[in-house]
Image: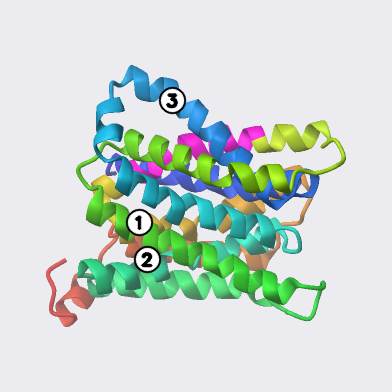
Amino acid sequence: MPSWILEYLLLSAVWGTSFLFMQISVHELGVMPTAALRVAIAAFTLLPWLHWRGQWGALRAHWRPIALAGLINPVIPFVLYAYALQSLTTGLASILNATTPLFGAVIALLWLRERLTASRVLGLFIGFVGVVALAWDRLGLGGSPGSGWAVLVCLGAPLMYGLGASFTQRHLKQVPSLAIATGSLLASSVALALPALWFWPAATPALHGWLAVICVGVMCTGFAYVLFFRLIERVGSARTLTVTFLIPVFAIVAGAVWLDESITLRMLVCGAVILTGTTLSTGLVRSRWLDGLGGRKP
């Protein structure tokens, strides 16, 4: 098994729990404070590591594209997710997040001319079908007030993730992943500081809100972003973004463990379909017959 697969699975598990923590914190702190604290905590978590690895020079040399990468990802996606989680469940938000590889593959194809084998195209399709099947009974837009708009807002985040991944691969490919992660989070902290102060809640947030935002900042952002950029360096943006196919599986399990949500046969079957699509779309499993029909070598 390739060594990057372990990092891939770890990233999907960490990001799967991030929706749970964000929903808890956004109901206590609000949209802008949640997004701002998430990036600020993550940035200060990574700063000592950046210093220890001696990568300040790389950050200073490439600070302009790194700062722009921070605005694309994470500023806009984090704000959009925080807004959407006011009315969407963590499971539904994570399922919508699984459209990221589709946006990413299209953007990488148009912008980077990244070639996809027939096996990977089939994997993207299978993964998408699994996600849609898993989300089908939750996508009614006539439920809670504002849920339809929240779904559209939520879809804007994976679009920005796809754009950010291709931007990183195009302009920051030779920059160390730690410098990119820390610099983009620092830029995000500066960009969100004033909006967070303006929308700071009048009532004192409860302790569980603070604990949730600390968890999402340290583990689900700081640590996860290093893994994310490392994977882009090693296997490319389109393949890295397929990690979002697995996130709903981990998010649903987290909901069952911490929120006593039930795990149904539908979830298990759709999870198996998503895993099948993921193995194909990442290239872990390939079909020589399909790739031969597509005119490409596997």
The question of residue 223 being in magenta is answered with yes
Please state if 246 lies on the left or on the right of 133 as rendered. Answer: left
Magenta stretch: dominant secondary structure: helix
Q: Earlier in the sequence, mark 1 or mark 3?
A: 3
Please state if 236 lies on the left or on the right of 42 as rendered. Answer: left
Rendered image: mark on residue 199:
none
In x, y percent, where is residue 272? 51, 63
When asked about the image quadrant of residue 72, the answer is bottom left
In x, y percent, where is residue 174? 19, 43
Which residue is identified by label 1? 165
Rendered image: mark on residue 47:
3
* Quadrant location of the N terminus in the rendered image: top left
Q: Disc 1 marks which amino acid?
A: Ala
- Judging depth in this view, the residue of 227 and 84 nearest the camera is 84
Q: Disc 2 marks which amino acid?
A: Gly
- Judging depth in this view, the residue of 101 and 197 nearest the camera is 197
